[in-house]
Image (cartoon, helix red, strand yellow):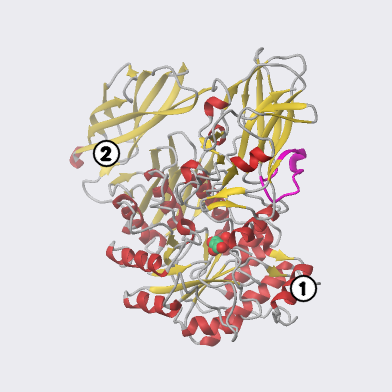
Amino acid sequence: MSGRAHREHRTATVRTSPNPTRHGPSRALRALSVAGAATALAFGGLAGPSAAPAAAATPYPNLTPTPPMGWNNWSYYGCDISEETVLANARALVSSGLAAKGYDTVTTDDCWMTHTRAADGNLVPDPTRFPHGMAYVGEQLHAMGLKFGIYEDAGTSTCGGYPGSYGHIKQDADLFAKWKVDYLKLDGCNVPVPAGQSADDAYHKLYGDMSQALLDTGRPIVYSVSAPAYFEGEKDWHHVISWSAEVGNLWREGADVAMESSSARGKWSSIKYNYTYNVPLADLQSPGRWNDPDFLLAGQSRLTGDEIRSQMSLWSVMAAPLISSTDLTKASPDALSVLGNKDVIAVDQDAKGLQGRIVRHGDGYDVLSKPLANGDRAVALFNSSDEARTITTTAAEAGLPDGNSYLLKDLWSKETTRTTGTIAADVPAHATVLYRVHAGSAPRVQPATAITWTRTGGEGTTSTWKVALADHGPTGLTGARLKLGAPDGWNLSDSDVSLGNVRPGGSATATVTAKGPDAKPGTTVTPLTATARYRAGGAGEGSVTGQASVVTEVPYPSLEAAFNNVGVTNDAAPPAEGNYTTGNFDGGGDSYSAQALAAAGVTPGAELAKDGVTWTFPAAKPGTPDNVALAGQSITLTGSGSKLWFLGAEAGFVSGQVKVTYTDGTTSTGSLGFPNWCCTAGTEYGATTVATSGHRNTPNGPANFGIGYKLFGNSVPLTAGKTIRTVTLPDADAIHVFAVTVQ
Ligand code: GLA
């Protein structure tokens, strides 16, 4: 079975998971059924573990007093790895200076081995990918002063379909020790659950056995336990984390972070998703035992500077392992400087070893605070929303001792300011402001100030705002001026306003109207900026900047008008490997085959009918579009009837709300979901199968994994007697809609 086919199978099972997520790994294949286990035994001749109750080597030695740091190939390269890739990235870790800053463990993830073990039962490195074997990779890494990490799986096979450690735990541990491995990531796909045992028990036993086997080697091997990721959101989840903290040093506890091939939107939502499941788990962490929300994506394409700084800030405040997964040989200086920010790394690696917690949560933002060994606090103001906003907390709320003076060091801008207690900043969309807060004062430090934009009126691209400059420091401001800016084509009622003097604790306000050109279809976010300059007594000249977002939403004239992502490619010209912009239905580079669709009667402009409903397949050439970019957006549509029928499919397992707006201004909503394009029963969400094509295209050409690639029909109800004006599609980029029709 190829790795990919195997992964599809995993994906297929996600739908049964209580926690389906389009981001990640297919957690639900955590337990092979007993029948599956029996099959594995029959075919693989595996000696299963004894039926003894879970025996864990507890507690596993504390080999990582601070969160592990390093590099792993997975989210950037997937299975496309080799000795050269791994060593080139290792050299880049050293030459970029990241290794010296702590990124010292280089882990080769899945797919490093061959599909069968040797006659003696040992794992065999893939001779093409790793021609000199794995011990050689370790030697090279050690010669560079780095540590050697390797991947295996506790089940019968890895998530990519290579031999797992099940039945070979001691043998594999010994082999890894012989190869001088320093770090083991033990994944949890394909774990058999013996009859009468819970999945929790089965995982505990295997991970405990590996813990003991690693100890028995006598070699200190950092042990990363993936078991909790297979229980994310389930009732046993916290229990699995609690024993993971006994048998190992760190644990993956949720979905995989997005792969390099994901869209910008997919990557950002995956960072937010992993943050969201990781942040409430602070109670399950202790010094030397770490929650692992997966890799840092800095350096990967399509993420903004604010987004990668956010991830680095949040991971550090959560005391998460800092494991980069990108091509470091090509990473931009900006990406390297984000990964290499020493002040932020120091927050992560702080000797107190505690995960930060949310101290304030609001609509679209969180404030987190992490206690640090010297009594300081790291305070993160995280704007998870798509619009700039001012986020405010206080030193008391962040857990600092009582006092009337605190120093705020902004760990990205490196500026230090002084507050009497309020901690506030205008934070751009997706950005995080990270302060190290110290109770105390220092001479000639600028007062902490913040700008707040408050919208007071306007419509469309015309908006009126109050822009306030607040002084949170102990020193007043004199001669304050506000400079306002907007993109080309925009007009502001004022661009330079005098605010005069601001007393400590006070604020001064200007009013401004911004007017932009007519908005384009879709959601457009336009930033307006304000920079205040002032004098603050002996501290001299100071300044602060803040942003507002003007958001306009205009319906597209039609569904087709919004297409921009490719769902169908031609067999004869599959997209070049890595060139996902021309053929990417599933986010992993795979797409429908134009030829296979044509064989099923699905051609550009074709009328497709099912159960009395007819759709027109988009008249677009292979290599053009479905409407993923339209997720959450509105289209113009006219007609009236009882149902609105969609033709589509999913590269995930989510449903979402469709909103229909009628000409009289009223609205109705309905839930829309499609089955996954392959691999499922095809009846999920009440959908019907409209067409089945025989194969898909992958970056390496056409492929058939023994399943059909389908198009589905599904509907939402309409309000009888009303005429549709616009339809807002579900805000889920896994849902692809090819056509809409009113019945
Ligand atoms: C799972 C893990 C990933 C990676 C892959 C390899 O999805 O969560 O981190 O190791 O398996 O197949």
Q: Quadrant of residue 378?
A: bottom left
Task: Look at the image and tell me in which quarter the N terminus lies.
Answer: bottom right
x and y percentages locating residue 511 in the rendered image: 36, 19
Neighbour class for label 1 at 10 Å: few (<14), some, many (≥20)? some
Q: Magenta segment range?
A: 675-691
Q: What residue type is labelled 1?
A: Ala
x and y percentages locating residue 272 in the rendered image: 52, 47
Q: In which quarter of the image is residue 663?
A: top right
Determine the CA span between mark 2 and mark 1. 74 Å
Q: Say whether residue 472 is left or right of residue 675.
A: left
Badge 2 is on which residue? 475
Point 52% across, 35% down: residue? 624
x and y percentages locating residue 55 in the rendered image: 67, 80
Give the quarter the ligand 1 occupies: bottom right
Q: Which amino acid does label 2 sit on?
A: Thr
Q: Up-down: is 193 above or below 443?
A: below
The disc, 2 or 1, on the residue closer to the chain's N-terminal end is 1
Badge 1 is on which residue? 38
Most foreground residue, 113 or 332: 113
Q: Please tell me whether residue 425 belongs to the stretch shown in magenta.
A: no
Point 31% across, 35% down: residue? 545
Q: Which mark is residue 461?
A: none
Most foreground residue, 571 or 445: 571
